[in-house]
Image (cartoon, rainbow, N blue to C red):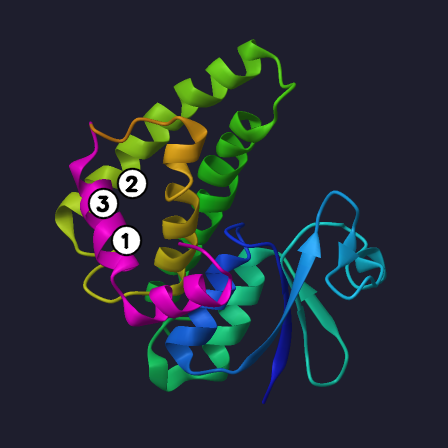
Amino acid sequence: MTFTLYYKAGACSLAPHIVACEAGIPLDLVSVDLATKKTETGDDYLAVNPKGYVPALELDNGQVLTEVAVVVQYLADRKPEASLIPPAGSLDRYRVQEWLAFTGAELHKNYFPLFVANAPEAAKELARSVLAQRLKVVDQALARNPFLTGDTFTVADAYAWVVLSWSRRAGVDLSAYPGILRFLEDVRARPAVQRARSEEGLA
């Protein structure tokens, strides 16, 4: 079982990379230039993923899965013994999916304007204002438990950690969120996270 992960270093595609490392799933890694939509070998990335962004996971049968929340669940389900996601149909599974949806809609999308150089300042201020409220929710959860859904690291933590780790580059001050700061440090220390970062050439 070997899959190909199309990624950009440090982007949200780092989340499925971390999940694969946690689960012991081998990946063939292909870097993508999101500006030119070319892979590191010069191929047309739009032929792989017409959406033009990462991640994309090419399966053994040639089919391609996209969207972070879907890709991380697919990988976790390949190795249930890694306990990265609860069984399908359980309430615990829906709790993980709840956090995946929240991270995608409320965190990821509100960090995005902060990385767009020509985004109107009003849009950036709105993003910062919304993020301040959403980060409180995350911080409260992490004040109660080591991870978002309890004592066990799941795919939701992988995705949230990647997005929250953008804070310094995005100019988002996390000093008011001790739970998040603790979480960022703890997850970064995980061997799988260190391996994924190293494989993407991240310091």
Which image quadrant: the C terminus?
Answer: bottom left
Highlighted range, magenta: 176-203
Q: Quadrant of residue 57?
A: bottom right
Which image quadrant: the N terminus?
Answer: bottom right
Instruction: State the CA–CA distance, disc 2 to disc 1.
Output: 8 Å
Q: Position of residue 149 (x, y in %)?
A: 27, 57
Mark 3 residue crowding within 10 angstroms, few (<14) / some (14–19) / many (20+): some
Asked if residue 199 is positioned above or below residue 171 in the image, the reply reads below
> In front here: 102 or 15?
15
Q: Position of residue 84 (x, y in %)?
A: 36, 72
Q: Is residue 87 visible?
A: no
Total labels: the figure holds 3
Instruction: State the CA–CA distance, disc 3 to disc 1.
Output: 6 Å
Residue 202 sits inside the magenta stretch: yes
* Residue at the image point whose x is 78% and y is 50% from the top: 37
Name of the residue lying farthest toward the bottom: 1
Name of the residue lying farthest toward the top: 122
The type of residue carrying mark 3 is Ala
Query: Which residue is denoted by mark 3 in the rendering?
Result: 141
Residue 116 sits inside the magenta stretch: no
The type of residue carrying mark 1 is Leu
Instruction: State the CA–CA distance, disc 2 to disc 3.
Output: 5 Å
